[in-house]
Image: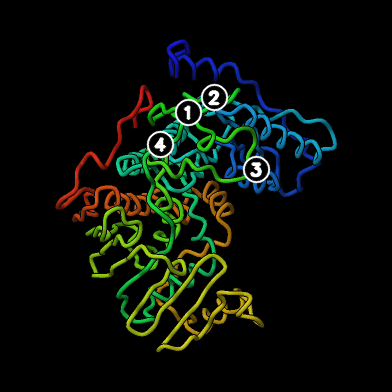
Amino acid sequence: MSHSQPSRRSFIKSAAGAVAAPFILPSRIWSAETAPNSRINLGFIGVGKMNSGHLGNFLGRESVQVVAVCDVDTNRRENAKKRVDDTYGKQAGTEYKGCSAYNDFRELLARKDIDAVVIATPDHWHAYIGIAAVRAGKDVYGEKPLTHNVHEALTLTKAVRDSGRIFQTGSQQRSSKEFRVAAELVRNGVIGDIKTITTSFGDPAPVYNLPEEAAEPGLDWDLWCGPGPLKPYNSILSPRGVHTHFPKWRDTREFGGGMITDWGAHHIDIAQWALGVDESGPVEVRAAQGKDAKRGAQLVYANGVVLTHETGKGVSIYGTEGEIHVNRGKFELILGGKTVHKFFDKAVDKGTSLDREVILTEREFLKDAKVKLYDSKNHHDDWLNSIKTRERPICDVAVGATTVISCHLMNMSYYSGTSFKWNPTERTFAEGGDPKWLTRDYRGEWVV
């Protein structure tokens, strides 16, 4: 923030006093089972490609009402505001102007009427805004990867616990049946003792090296950079206007973590769920062979299982009696070298479906399973239910922390080209490694 703007304390105080009560939809447009005062008021922070999807989902729910959106880009926030107003106006059969739009997330968080927020900013903002949100008394749905570094994962987890708020990490694969069944098969020993796991996703992130472009009108670039360095503007990071693709800020170490913290945060998460190490993590990280390698880094767990980053089928788990391959909409169980159930390629696996193969697998091999994992049918539903019950969601902040720490450790090995030992209890290096890798240099007031 520039020095001409008010301090954080005065800003929030004035914002809280200036916000008027939101327009409430006529109760006739809601179901009789949903009383107006029982709805959850939501705010959306960062309304680019990812949160546009979340917004569409929540706008169709009678149990919630979207009352505010926030983005540092004028076009994106005004587009999101219009979308909310148009949707509710159509439902009510009258003009609706009840959604507020903010440039600064602190102004949104200062509103006492907002119960929960959905955060889908670039990675470098996840921790700071998440911490501010729970301290402001909001429940949170926070996109993965949970944070930009290890220090932030630990700090955010503590803030959530201290606040007593609900925090769902947006690792939605945990709410998909094929992944849960795959994990249960492993937990119940169906494929024997686990030996190795391979996870397939793209490259680690390079350092920022993009040329400067003319500033985008209506974009608060200083606030976009926030805790990260104030780099020259480039539309690759924050596209001009309303975009429908995932921007390439993920491919910078300063603002993301490459595909290691993008798809890796999904697939490593499932591998660790299957191993039952949500409360710990790896004990060793082995660097890939070869200079500038982009595949081959390994995470080693206390039970001897080695997880390797490769190009493959998604998540592949190999045991003494068989193997499991799983990805979104894809599933394969092999026992004794023979495929038992499979739906991986609809052009090849004709005459069946994912649901059929997964359900048959569950009936045949997990009917009397001793280990049954948390069964969530929908990640958003699970979060909303947790808000009501105050029980932790399927991908609680601590789960997101363990997953993202493993991703960061893998990235460290790629960035440094070195191997090291890790203490998953203390969440620090046991041998080798540099403590400075666990955090970052923060800019201005945006210190986590």
- Residue 153, percent from left and from top: 35, 44
Q: Look at mark 4 in the image and give the residue it sits on.
A: 209
Q: Quadrant of residue 343?
A: bottom right
- Residue 81, percent from left and from top: 68, 32
Of the image marks 3 and 2, the number of the one nearer the N terminus: 3
Gap between marks 1 and 3 measured at Cα = 41 Å
Gap between marks 2 and 1 measured at Cα = 7 Å
Helix, strand or loop at label 1? It is loop
Question: In the rendered structure, are the residues bearing label 1 and label 3 in contact, judged by CB atoms less than 8 Å apart?
Answer: no
Q: Look at mark 3 in the image and give the residue it sits on.
A: 64
Local crowd at mark 1 within 10 Å, few (<14), some, or many (≥20)? few
Q: Nearer the viewer, residue 194 or 158?
A: 194
Local crowd at mark 4 within 10 Å, few (<14), some, or many (≥20)? few
Q: Is residue 75 above or below residue 122?
A: above
Indicate left or right for 114 with 321 as reference. Answer: right
Local crowd at mark 3 within 10 Å, few (<14), some, or many (≥20)? some
Residue drawn at (41%, 71%), measured in percent from left and top?
Answer: 316
Please state which amino acid type lies under the numbered disc 4.
Asn
Q: Quadrant of the C terminus?
A: top left
Q: Quadrant of residue 250?
A: top left
Helix, strand or loop at label 3? It is strand
Gap between marks 1 and 4 measured at Cα = 9 Å
Of the image marks 4 and 3, the number of the one nearer the N terminus: 3
Please state which amino acid type lies under the numbered disc 2.
Ala
Q: Is residue 362 visible?
A: yes
Residue drawn at (55%, 47%), measured in percent from left and top?
Answer: 388
Q: Which mark is residue 212?
A: 1
Local crowd at mark 2 within 10 Å, few (<14), some, or many (≥20)? few
Please state which amino acid type lies under the numbered disc 1.
Glu
Indicate left or right for 97 with 227 as reference. Answer: right
Q: Look at mark 2 in the image and give the residue it sits on.
A: 214
Gap between marks 3 and 2 measured at Cα = 40 Å
